[in-house]
Image: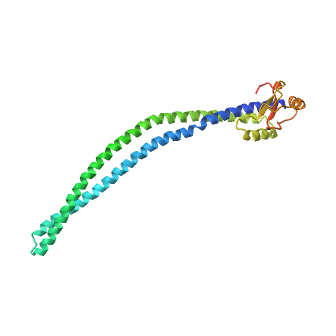
Amino acid sequence: MIAELESLITLQRIDARIGEFVRAKGGFPATIAELEVAVKKTQDALDALTKKQADVLGQKKAVEEKIADAKEHLDKSQELLNTIKTNREYDAVHTQIENFKHIVSGGDAQLKKFDQEIELLQQSIDKAAAQRDAIGSENAPRIAEIKGKMDTITASIDQATAERAGIIALVPKPLLRTYDHILKRRKNGNVLSFVTGDARTCSVCFKILEPQLINEIRKANRVMTCQNCGSIFIWKGETKTEG
């Protein structure tokens, strides 16, 4: 039984290492997400400006087509004046000509506004692109570094998990079930209570132990747990490895 309990000591040490690795790795995904979000925000801002400029360019093109169409009709109307024979026809065509001229002049004014807006948007796009590139250049190495650390920790976890598999093969299944059951309920990972002749208390909950119980723990003929906290007792004085 002492050898089996010693295996539990090794097992708890391995689980403590795994727990440290997991905790060390725990904050990395959030940090990476934060850095990636910062880059994405700048890209989203750039995309929004680019889309707005594209919309303005589309509006400008529509006005240009409208002006071109009005000019074409204007030319035809002016040619039509040469063939008109009545004042009524002349007035009607002249009204059309004025309408087309109004469309052209109004369109030209719109085009100037579009050009100004497009120029301002281009300046904003250039600034947004520079900001995106700056944040991307700053965050990319940090993201790569963190991912590298995560990979290293993952490799360490895999190695420790492999060591754990070798140890649990030495522990009887009922004892392992007891250990794992307690481990799942312990945030600090302390499953084992190391008892010494000097302290004579549970090292987990510090409950004072009766002399008869201490003698039973010392003999290690069976697995014993603390009635107060449920930890598995280990007689520290008779183990080859201290906890």
Look at the picture and state if 206 lies above or below 57: above
Residue at 12% x, 67% y: name it. Answer: 79
Look at the picture and state if 239 lies above or below 41: above
Look at the picture and state if 193 lies above or below 39: above
Point out residue 183 in the picture as x, y percentages from the top left corner.
74, 38
Residue 72 in view here: no
Quarter holding the C terminus?
top right
Point out residue 133 in the picture as x, y percentages from the top left corner.
40, 38
Q: What colouring does the structure picture have? A: rainbow
Q: Residue furthest right?
A: 212
Residue at 29% x, 49% y: name it. Answer: 117
Point out residue 47 in the picture as x, y percentages from the top left corner.
40, 47
Residue 116 in view here: yes
Count of numbered circles on the image: 0
Residue at 73% x, 41% y: name it. Answer: 185
25 or 227: nearer the viewer: 227
Picture quadrant where residue 73 is located: bottom left
Point out residue 52 in the picture as x, y percentages from the top left corner.
36, 51
Residue at 42% x, 44% y: name it. Answer: 43
> Is 201 left, or right, of 24 in this rendering?
right
Quarter holding the N terminus?
top right
Picture quadrant where residue 124 is located: top left
> Is 224 left, or right, of 154 in this rendering?
right
